[in-house]
């Protein structure tokens, strides 16, 4: 699959079973997601995980799908927060490029 990182165990050089892993499309951790929150709570409270690592990766297909403007169905709802942040960033960049100070410093070129 495009943009699919290697297994978590390979990345940190641990044997299978030494790591409790939760993954989802585009590596999101929204505060209203009961699945991710349950996994985190279970890991910390029940199986006593001591270290939590949050990892992203280059070339993420989920991020690309969120910002390419195409519609894909239900996953669009999941990817909405990314699209929203990307839209805000584009607006900020456009405002910055139009500002006289940005042109003077050469950022608008
Ligand atoms: Zn990804």
Image (tube, rainbow, N blue to C red):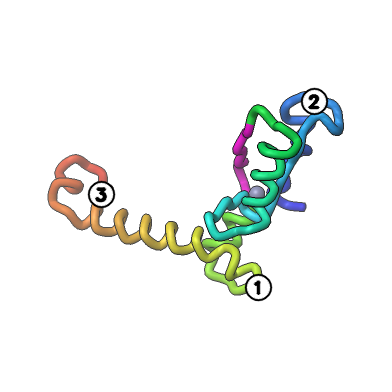
Main SS of the magenta part reads loop
Q: Position of residue 16 (x, y in %)?
A: 86, 32
Residue 94 circle label:
none
Q: Is mark 1 within 8 Å of ligand 1?
A: no
Element under disc 1: helix
The reply, left or right, for residue 94 in relation to residue 22 is left
- At label 1, counting other C-alpha atoms closer than 10 Å, the crowd grade (few under 14, some 14-19, many 20 or more) is few
- At label 3, counting other C-alpha atoms closer than 10 Å, the crowd grade (few under 14, some 14-19, many 20 or more) is some
Q: Quick one: which residue is furthest to the top in this view? A: 13
Element under disc 2: loop
For the record, the magenta segment spans: 52-60
To which quarter of the image does residue 30 belong?
bottom right
Element under disc 3: loop
| Image mark count | 3
The reply, left or right, for residue 69 in relation to residue 55 is left
Real-space Cα separation, disc 2 to disc 3, in angstroms: 46 Å
Task: Identify the residue shown where x is 60% and y is 61%.
Answer: 65
Query: Which residue carries the number 2 mark?
Result: 14
- Residues 95 and 14: in front is 14
Query: Which residue carries the number 3 mark?
Result: 108
- At label 2, counting other C-alpha atoms closer than 10 Å, the crowd grade (few under 14, some 14-19, many 20 or more) is few
Instruction: Tell me the mark number nearer the camera, choosing from 1 and 3.
Output: 1
Q: Tell me which numbered mark, 1 or 2, is placed earlier along the sequence.
A: 2
Real-space Cα separation, disc 1 to disc 3, in angstroms: 37 Å
Real-space Cα separation, disc 1 to disc 2, in angstroms: 34 Å
Residue 74 circle label:
1
């Amino acid at each position: 699959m495009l943009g699919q990182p290697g297994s978590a165990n390979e990345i940190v050089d641990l044997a299978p079973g030494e790591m409790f892993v939760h993954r989802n499309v585009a590596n999101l951790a929204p505060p209203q997601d009961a699945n991710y929150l349950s996994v985190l709570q279970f890991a910390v409270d029940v199986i006593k995980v001591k270290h939590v690592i949050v990892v992203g990766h280059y070339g993420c297909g989920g991020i690309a799908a969120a910002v390419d403007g195409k519609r894909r169905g239900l996953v669009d709802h999941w990817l909405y927060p990314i699209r929203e942040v990307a839209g805000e960033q584009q607006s900020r960049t456009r405002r910055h490029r139009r500002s006289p100070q940005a042109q003077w410093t050469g950022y608008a070129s």
